[in-house]
Image: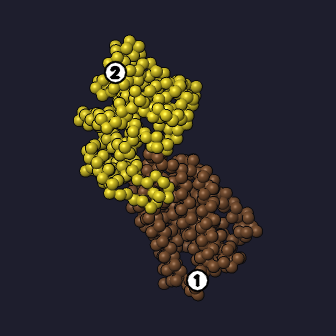
Amino acid sequence: MEYIFHLAILFSLFAIFAIALDLVAGYTGLISVCHAAFYGIGAYTTALLVQSVGLNFFFALLIGMLLTGIVALILGLVFSKFKGDYYVLGTLGFTYIAYTVFINWQSVTNGPLGVPGIPRPEIFGLSFSNSWSFLILSAIFVGVVYALARFVVSSSFGRVLRAIREDEEAIAIFGYRTSAFKLLIFIISAMSAALGGGLLASYLTYIDPGTFGITESIFVLSIVILGGLGSLRGPVVGALILVLLPEALRFVGFSPDIAAQMRVLIYGLLLVIMMRYRPQGLLGEYKL
Amino acid sequence: MTYALQTKNLSKVFGGVHAVDHLSISIPKGKITGIIGPNGSGKTTLTNVLTGFHSIDSGALVVGGEKEYERIHSYDVRNLGMTRTFQNVRVFEQMSVLDNILVVLTERGLFASLFDSHTTFHKNTAQEVLTRVGLWEKRNENAVNLSYGQRKLLEIARALAVNADVVFFDEPYAGLFPEMVKLVSGIMQELRETGKTVVLIEHDMALIRELCDHVIVLEAGKLLAEGKPEEVLADSKVIEAYLGA
């Protein structure tokens, strides 16, 4: 049962992360590969504030989200001028900057050794220290992020995002300052990713820079593309498949070591197959 | 005569080539003005400059005979009372036909748009313009599934929806069936009847003669001739440079 809870929690955390990325990549057409960095900023800020300063997890999580929002605001001011390939390359650059900071700012992040012993959340005497209670907490946060994303994409704001995705120049002549729309959704998306990162740090009780590199960004992008860009159900389904898939490999006879290697291979293969045969993903509405 | 738009010594240069060259023209208010000229004469570049797609390199644009602008952003165009269609159709392909219209009708403010969906008024306006171009029945289809002509009509409906004072139509008839041509001509005439200003970029001289009150002829980014269609199209300079007869 513990194992099932563990998988369900991982699924929840990646679903949060994937929904956050879909707001930018699927609804606005901006393929970001720097969301693992936001995940990391949220995770490190939450972990360090809880462990070193002794702040309550939920307060620390909020600060982590706000700090990530500020970083996203600064980055977004630069990135909102970019389109297409330039946007991808810009976000790739930031992923490496963030990774370098995580690994080299040893006095704060403890460098490659990471941050161990991160406590589980507690509030009003209620502890989320065991798996089933943490699952409930993460499920609540999935619901909150999903509802927020639904609210955003169903509004006129969401419709403008889709128009920006389709033809930014054409929608601009109807009076929209598109860079402001791109900036705001980038901040909302980054803060949602940071929420997932803070939860991940608390769940794993240990984080290191390796968790927040380009591989993680590509993995979550794979989730969104497999599930379907521009659909909120898509990232949830994508997270379910890609979190469970490596576990399924264990049951077909691969050793845990090989299963881990196969995982990356299968993600890559799935991306190639999806791009060839179903570029809009399983439930998506938007073709890249 | 009052003018909706005037350019004063307007220029646009690309890599040393003057696509629009010290151009001073006047577009009368409430009329249909045709802009004609050979390929590469600067018609579309002029439209792009006037609608903020390209910056103004020198000179100015006067809107409504009053305000003079030396710089226009594309997001300013709506507030200046202008809208346009494109030579190569630019609808929001992976959005529904209805959303293509609603998106230009609803809130423009960043935070206000978050708390806005659309009202009955917006939906009624969308229904009105889509019905006018015969696309209301296809409102739930994605624009990418429409034929080329239907996408052109959707773009025209989108321009109508914003109720702008000045509407630029950049080669709206290209690729349209005869009944669609008739529909688009009717729309332009209706706009004129309601006091709107229409700027039509077109190569078909029969349509220019039929619809336009005023014609501007460009050659190599410069003004070659302007005036009433029958006078301009009979001008020997225009015949030599463009009509070739």
Q: Quadrant of the N terminus of chain B?
A: top left
- Name the front one of labels 1 and 2: 2
What is the crowding at mark 2: few (fewer than 14 residues within 10 Å), some, or many (at least 20)? many
Q: Nearer the viewer, residue B97 or B156?
A: B156
What is the crowding at mark 1: few (fewer than 14 residues within 10 Å), some, or many (at least 20)? few
The tag on residue A148 is: none
Q: Is residue A266 above or below residue B9?
A: below
Residue A81 horizontal side relative to residue B135, left or right: right
Q: Provide residue B36's location: percent of width, then percent of height.
A: 39, 24
Q: Quadrant of residue B119?
A: bottom left
Colour for chain B in the figure: yellow
Image point 44% across, 27% down: which residue? B26
Q: Quadrant of residue A209?
A: bottom right
Which residue position holds label 1?
A123
Give the residue type at disc 2. Answer: Pro
Q: In this view of the protein, can residue A288 be seen by the observer?
A: no
Which residue position holds label 2?
B229
Q: Provide residue A167's location: percent of width, then percent of height.
A: 45, 46
Q: Nearer the viewer, residue B223 or A148?
A: B223
Q: Provide the secondary structure element on which disc 1 rests.
A: strand
Chain identifier matching the brown colour in the rendered picture:
A
Q: In this view of the protein, can residue B10 be seen by the observer?
A: yes
Q: Provide residue A151's location: percent of width, then percent of height.
A: 44, 64
Image point 55% across, 55% down: which residue? A183
Q: Are marks 1 and 2 in contact (CB under 8 Å)?
A: no
